[in-house]
Amino acid sequence: MPYIQQLSPHVADLIAAGEVVERPASVVKELVENAIDAGATAVVVEIQGGGISLIRITDNGCGIAPGELSTAFLRHATSKLRRSEDLAAIGTLGFRGEALAAISAVSRLDVFSRQRGAQTGASLHLEGGVPEAVEEAGCPEGTTMAVRELFYNTPARRKFMKTDSAEAAAAAAVVSQIALSHPEISVRLIRDGREELHTPGDGRLLSAIYAARGRDFALGLVEVDGGGEGVAVKGYVTEPLAGRGSRAMQTFFCCGRIIRSSLLTAALEEAYANRQMKGRFPGCVLHIDLPLHQVDVNVHPAKTVVKFVNERALFSAVHHTVADALDAAGRASASQAVPPTPPTAPPPPSEPQAGKTAPRDGFYQTMDAQTFRGKTAPQRAGEIRAAGSELGGRLTFRDAAPPRYGDRSLQSAGRPTPPARREALPASVPTPAAEREPAAPAGQTALPPEQTTFTPKPAPWRFAGEILRTYIVAEDGDEVWLIDKHAAHERINFDRLKAGAEPIMRQQLLAPLAVELPREQYAALLENLPLLEEFGFEAEDFGSGCLMVRGVPADLDEGLVRETLEDLSEKLLTGGNADPAAVRDAMLHTMACKAAIKGGWTSDPAELRALIERVQSGEVQYCPHGRPVKVKISKYEIEKMFKRA
Ligand code: ADP
Ligand code: MG
C-alpha cells in the first residue's frame, strides 16, 4: 500500500473542477451568474467552437478591485458569504466560491475588470489556475472573462465533449434560461460571430420569453400570478392546446435560480389533468418565490437541485395557481365572442346549493344530494323521473317546447335502440317499489309537469344546425362555432361525476342482464364491486366468468352495459399499481363517455342548444382526454377562403 499524502492543491482543484465544470455550458452558467450577482444590467456571452475554443462573458456590473483580482480565483474565495449562518438564507446565485477556481484550473483564462467609478481597470492571465501578475488595463466598467481552450489539461474530460454544435446548444440553453430568470437584464448571445439571442431587459417576462423561446411559444401562453402559504407563483404556462411533445419547455425558477424539480413538474402537470391530451406536456416559465430559509440550495455543486422545507405547500401553491389561471383563461376565451354583458348570459356553472332545486331561468335545474336524501323513497323516485330527462339529474334541456317530464330526451332521441322499460333509482338506495306519480321538484308548486312553462331568453348566439350528425354549428356575432357534441357532453358528464356532488342515479333493470367476461376482466370487476356500485351498477357474481347485472347508471343505455363494464375492467387492469385517484379518473372517463350522446346519433335541437350554452359559458373547454370541444372560425377566415378578403 503506498503511503498516504494530502493531494496537492492543483490536483484537488482539478478534481473539484470536475464537479462544477462539466462542460462549456456549466462555465457559461457560472460566469453569467457571477455577472448577475455583480448587479449587471447587460451581459454579453460569446462562444466559439462549442465553447471549447472560447467563452467570453462581458458584464457592466460592479467590477473587481485590482487588489482582489487574484484572490477571486482562489478556492473558497467569495464575497457573498461570510458566516456559516449566511448559508441558511442565500440570496445570491453564487456562494460556494468555487467557480472561478474551478474554471481557471481547466483552461487558459483572461480577466479584465474595472470597478464602477474607478479610473483604470486591471487584467490577469491564469494558465491552468496558476495566476500571472495583475496588470493595469484600460477597460470599460464591469468585468470581462475570456476562457480559452477549456479542458486543455484534462484530456479525459475533453474526450467526453459532444460535437461543437451540441455543446453550443447546451450553452445556448443555459443563456436562455438565465435570460428568462432575469427579464430586467439584457442578455445577448453571440455564437461564432452570429447573434442568437438578445433580450431587451425591459423587466417584462413576456419580452424575455418572446426572445428566448420564440414567437409561437410566446403567443400560446396563459399568465399565472398567485400563490399561497408564503409561496408566490408568477409567470406563464402554455395553453392546454399548445402542449409539447416533451418536458423540454418547462422552466422553473426558485428565488431567481433555475432548478430542476420533479415536485414542481408534477404540480404543473396535475393542473393540466383532464385538459391536456395524453403524451403532450405543458410548457412553462414559472418564477417561484418563497422565504429564503424555506429553501436549501446547498445540495449540489451545480446548484440546480434544491430542497424545500414545505413541499406540500409548494405543490399546492403551484398546482392551484396554474389550475385557476387555466380556468380563468378558458372562461375569458369563451366570453370573448360574447358581448360584455350579454342580456341572457347563461348562469355561471354552479355547485348545487342545499334547499334549492327550482329551475333557474328555465334552463338549468340542479338537485343536490342533501335535498335529495331528505325525501322519502317514493318522492325520490318520482323526482328522478321528473328530472330524468337529463344527464343524471344535473342538467335539464328545456326549450320553447319543453319536453315532457320523464322524457329521457338526450338519451332517447335518435337512438339506434329504444330505451328499455326500467325504473330509475339513486344508486345508493335499495330497490323499493317505486311510485309512478311524478312529484314536483322541491321548491316548486305542484303543477302538473306538462303545464310548467319556461320562457327561454334570446341567446347572444344562434343555433344554426348540425352537420355530419356530430358537429353543432352555432353563429355568434362574426364567428362560427363548431362544437363536437359528444366531446362537449362527455366533458359535462365527467365534471359532474368527478365533483361527486350528486348521487349517481341507478335504474333497476326489469330483467337482469348476464354479462360474460374474459377471466381477467371478470376478476378485476369482482374485486371492485363496491366501486361499481358507486358508479351506479348493481351486479353480483353468477359464477364462471359471469356477472349478473341488476341495475345500471340511469343515463347509460342498456345496449352499452357490456361494453362499459369491459372498458372499466380494462382501466382497472391497466391501472395496476398506479395511483388509485388516476385509475378512478380513468374509470370516470369511461362512464362519462358511455353516457354521452354519440356522434352519428340524431339529437334534439333543444339538447344541442343546451350544449352550446354550456360551451358558450366557457364551462366546457376540452373533453376529458384533452381534445378541444369547439373550434371557432371567424368571418374573416371564411371570407379569405372565398377570396373576398
Ligand atoms: P461565488 O460566486 O460563489 O462567490 P466565484 O468563484 O464564482 O464564487 O467568484 C468569486 C468572487 O469573485 C465572487 O464572490 C465575486 O466577489 C467575484 N466575482 C466573480 N465574478 C465577478 C464579476 N463578473 N463581477 C464582479 N465580481 C465578480
Ligand atoms: Mg460564482
Image (cartoon, rainbow, N blue to C red):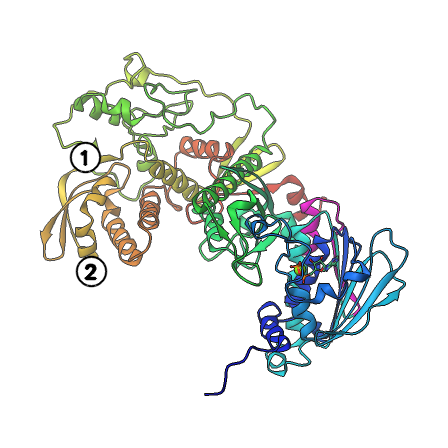
Q: Is residue 256 magenta?
A: no
Query: Ligand 2 closer than 8 Å to the CB at disc 2?
Result: no
Circle 2 sits in a helix, a strand or a loop, which is it?
Answer: helix
Q: Are marks 2 and 1 in contact (CB under 8 Å)?
A: no
Q: Which residues are magenta?
A: 193-212
Horizontal arrangement in the rendering, residue 347 relative to residue 146 (left or right): left
Residue 199 at x, y = what percent?
A: 74, 53
User: Which mark sits nearer the N-terminus, 2 or 1?
Assistant: 1
Q: CA distance from mark 2 to mark 1?
A: 30 Å
Place of residue 45 in the rendered image (x, y in percent of width and height, measured from the top left): 75, 63
Neighbourhood count class around disc 2 (C-alpha, 10 Å): few under 14, some 14–19, many 20 upward: few
In magenta segment, residue 206: yes
Count of numbered labels shown in the rendering: 2
| Quadrant housing the N terminus | bottom left
Q: Residue at x 29, y 24 (%)?
A: 405
Q: Residue at x 20, y 33 (%)?
A: 428
Q: Is residue 26 above or below residue 394?
A: below
Q: Position of residue 264 (x, y in %)?
A: 49, 50
Mark number displayed over residue 520? 2
* Looking at the image, residue 338 lies above or below residue 635: above
Q: Which residue is drawn at the image coordinates 40% and 18% (left, top)?
A: 454
Ligand 2 visible in quadrant = bottom right
Identify the residue position indicated by label 1 in the image.
422
Between 450 and 348, the one nearer to me in the picture: 348
- Residue type, label 2: Glu
Res 214 seen here: no
Q: From the image, which quarter does the C terminus lie in?
A: top right
